[in-house]
Amino acid sequence: MSLRFYNSLTNKIEEFKPVKPGEVSIYVCGPTVYNYIHIGNARPVVFYDVVRRYLKFCGYNVKFASNITDIDDKIIKKAAESHKSEKEIATFYEEAYFNDVKRLNSLLPDYIPHATSYIGDMINFIADLIAKGYAYEIDGNVYFRISKIADYGLLSNQAQEALVEGARVEVAEAKENPLDFTLWKKTEEGIKWDSPFGQGRPGWHTECVVMNHKLFGPQIDIHGGGMDLKFPHHENEIAQCEAMYNTHLANYFLHVGRVDLKGVKMSKSLGNYIFVKDFDTPRKIMVLRMILAFSPYRANINYQDDLFKQYETIYDKWQRAYKQAYYLLAANDLLANNLDEKIIADFKGYMDADFNVQNVQTMLDELIKNCNLALRQNDLGRLATLLNTFKVISDTFGLDYYLTPLTEDLKTSYLAWQAARKAKDFAKADSYRQELVAKGIL
Ligand SMILES: [Zn+2]
């Protein structure tokens, strides 16, 4: 069986076939860096990391890009409010973002394009769209002419009339069509660049298309982002790619659901959000990662304290069992590299079925139960295989149990503790035990 998942472009579960055999290109829309990220922003950071790790596990050479939108009205506003430059604001929050990414244990992207590094390319791109008749300029603003794109609305699966009514599209009197979107925005305030259309800055939809194209060429395998990016962002990216390259940008659009807080959509303006930085211990951030990684990816997550507690219990259980088995095997030089092939085949079967992550969670839980069973039965060969199988699957989900490395000294103490227990020298065993507990081994 091979990987199949839901392609938002066709609204079907399809078999994944990369453009180049053995290679996968993924571009995930990254953050606009004007504030700390909340747990909803962290969902793509975790989900696409799991996808990326899984594709690597399957043997693909994965090229992963995620951009930084380092110029935007929100950044300009924040800079003006805090009497700083846009660059200072963007740099500060980008650093905070990658700090969260690393604490979430997501791999850093292979490419991190910054919008401000591609302004010249974006200006050329917009000029080409005008030359081809796909864009027009009015008073220093440039708009995309969507009437030239026959299947506009393909991704959001809506007719143009419905899009006009249903979406909050800016209504500028002068535009030919209310859905025509901004490619170049004339700006008076904040940072701006010179262009043949006057001073201003490029629109967000153009930024991603140009950076994507510069990195990967006109056709990539997977384009990702939150469901909320389907329209207008991804729809408008597709329109520009159709105009310029006659492609839909990506063969597969893979969208991930949002995170609600106690049943209400998270919003910075309403003040109902939780920042990722507030999960301020390794254990808390790993529990958050589990919630984001093991929830069905297309559904919204309703985050609440109970959900956190539920996953906290699971994490503690897995961590305890993993740690106990790991040190026992490591101290006795019994760690293994082999896998339970039947369990691995099941794991692949679940992931290949449109990323059935819930079944993987159940399977990891079973594995921990069986590790405990093998431990009780003192079947250390079986335990070693199960533990390694657990680790390989758990690594694909980017989970970390933060084990202290077993130094030679600690190994000696561990073996001495085991020997004292066996000899029923409880006083001695207890003193070793206390040392091992203090060092985090027991
Ligand atoms: Zn984007």
Image: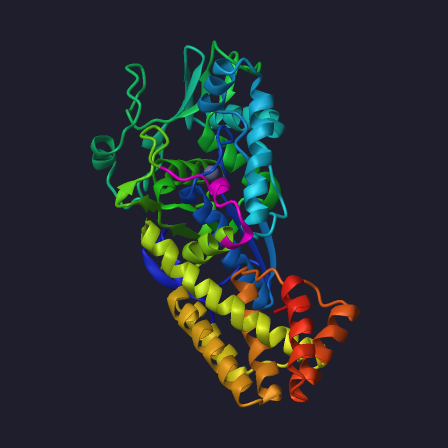
- For image coordinates 67% across by 82% down, the residue present is 418
Task: Report the quarter where the C terminus lies.
Answer: bottom right
Residue 25 seen:
yes
Residue 137, x across and y down, in percent:
42, 17
Left or right placement of residue 411 versus residue 127 in this view = right
Tell which of 54 and 307 is nearer to you.
Answer: 307
- For image coordinates 59% across by 80% down, the residue present is 339
**Extent of the magenta region:** 273-283
Residue 331, x across and y down, in percent:
71, 77
Residue 437, x across and y down, in percent:
63, 66
Left or right placement of residue 379 versus residue 162 in this view = right
- For image coordinates 61% across by 24% down, the residue present is 120
Q: How is the image coloured?
A: rainbow
Q: Farthest residue in the front direction? A: 427
Does 425 lie within the magenta span?
A: no
Tell which of 218 and 419 is nearer to you.
Answer: 419
Residue 298 seen:
no
Disc count in the image? 0
Position of residue 254 relative to residue 169, above or below, is below
Tell which of 21 and 437 is nearer to you.
Answer: 437
Residue 153, x across and y down, in percent:
30, 41
**Quarter of the image where one finds residue 15:** bottom left
Does 276 lie within the magenta span?
A: yes
Position of residue 414 relative to residue 425, above or below, is above
Q: Farthest residue in the right direction? A: 408
Left or right placement of residue 251 versus residue 116 in this view = left
Position of residue 342 relative to residue 152, above or below, is below
**Quarter of the image where one finds residue 159:** top left
Left or right placement of residue 264 versus residue 395 in this view = left
